[in-house]
Image: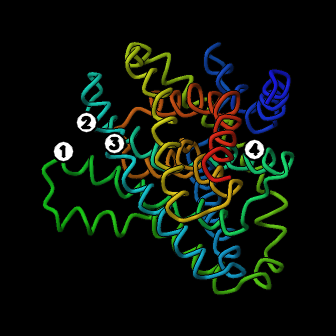
Amino acid sequence: MSVLGFLDLALNNLISPPILFFALGLAAALVRSDLNVPEAVAKALSIYLIMAIGFKGGVEMATASLTEAALAIGAGILLSFAIPFISYGLLRTTSRTGRIDAAAIAAHYGSISIVTFIAATDAGLAMGLAAAGFMVAVAAAMEAPAIFSGLMLAGKQEGQSRGDLIREVATNGSILLLVGAFLIGWATGTDGQAVVAPFFDEIFRGVLCLFLLDMGLVAGRGLLRQAGELRIPVIIHGLYMPIIGAALGLGTAALLGLDAGTGALLMTLSASASYIAVPAAMRLALPQAKPAISLTLSLGVTFPFNLIFGIPLYYAASTAVLG
């Protein structure tokens, strides 16, 4: 891919309403504006987005080849569950990040970025490397395992018994909603999607814009209060974790025999960091964690890295290895 190709891809993905609304929220916070999204509204937005992501993934699962989809979903679940442990171990080894914050950050890196996924899908179509439709189901399936891992990592450090921890994670509202919505989408399929299309499809991006506006406000105000927490080793973590995740995704794609377009999307999912489902879950489950750190890494470091450098790199590597 040429230099101009890289620049065009970066521009097309960075200049989008959701990302610009995040930037607006961040800027408003940094200039100490009184702009605010009420807490009740923020929680409602979180619930909506988690439900929509899960439901859409279930609908895609209803129309997919069960054998191939099941293998890819299983691999995605394993990747999502395992990557947080790698991220947590590296953070605790290379930085002085606290245990709760390290667990929250690690959960972000095991999960996925929907906007990065959409950008990678569009890039693949432009390059003639369309991916299998069930990758949307894989994306939805990769949300909950990372949240589970993050809560396990945080819980272990708090002295909880294993049984109490499993019960807490299994009954966590965000996980229950995501998995439940996925199963409902799978059970109702395209007929069910047609019934709720105005709610889940037409307003999704608008709600995402409002959610990211709030996330920008949360991240900006957190930075003003805790600027010293984001040290160089933590920033570097946001640059090398995508590469580690993408490498694991590529190896998994090769083992599954996926085509280049589908493999590149699995790499992208493994390399991205959540800023929708996981921040929403961490806000509810780990309120003591500092969102300024995890959101700055996922949105301020990893997200632009993936858009500018990562996606073209993942497609190039996938094409070279998977053909």
Give whichever of discs 4 and 1 has the lower sequence position: 4
Residue bearing mark 4: 119
Measure how far apart labels 3 and 4 are at the Cα level.
26 Å
**Amino acid type for the residue under numbered disc 2:** Arg
**Amino acid type for the residue under numbered disc 3:** Ile
Residue bearing mark 3: 86
Identify the residue shown where x is 19% and y is 50%: 156
Residue depth check, mark 4 versus mark 1: number of the one nearer the observer: 4
Measure how far apart labels 2 and 3 are at the Cα level.
14 Å
Mark 4 crowdedness (10 Å alpha carbons): few <14, some 14-19, many ≥20: many
In the picture, the quarter occupied by the N terminus is top right
Residue bearing mark 1: 157
Question: Is 300 left, or right, of 25 in this rendering?
Answer: left
Tag 4–tag 1 contact (CB < 8 Å): no
Helix, strand or loop status at disc 4: helix
**Amino acid type for the residue under numbered disc 4:** Ala
Residue bearing mark 2: 99
Estimate the x, y position of residue 263 in percent, counting from the top left: 62, 54
Estimate the x, y position of residue 7 in percent, counting from the top left: 81, 23
Say if residue 22 shows up in the picture.
yes
Helix, strand or loop status at disc 2: helix
Q: Nearer the viewer, residue 292 or 255?
A: 255
Residue depth check, mark 2 versus mark 3: number of the one nearer the observer: 3
**Amino acid type for the residue under numbered disc 1:** Gln
Residue depth check, mark 1 versus mark 3: number of the one nearer the observer: 3
Measure how far apart labels 1 and 2 are at the Cα level.
7 Å
Q: Quadrant of residue 72?
A: bottom right
Question: Is 15 left, or right, of 288 in this rendering?
Answer: right
Identify the residue shown where x is 60% and y is 59%: 139
Could you tell me how many numbered marks the image carries?
A: 4
Mark 3 crowdedness (10 Å alpha carbons): few <14, some 14-19, many ≥20: some
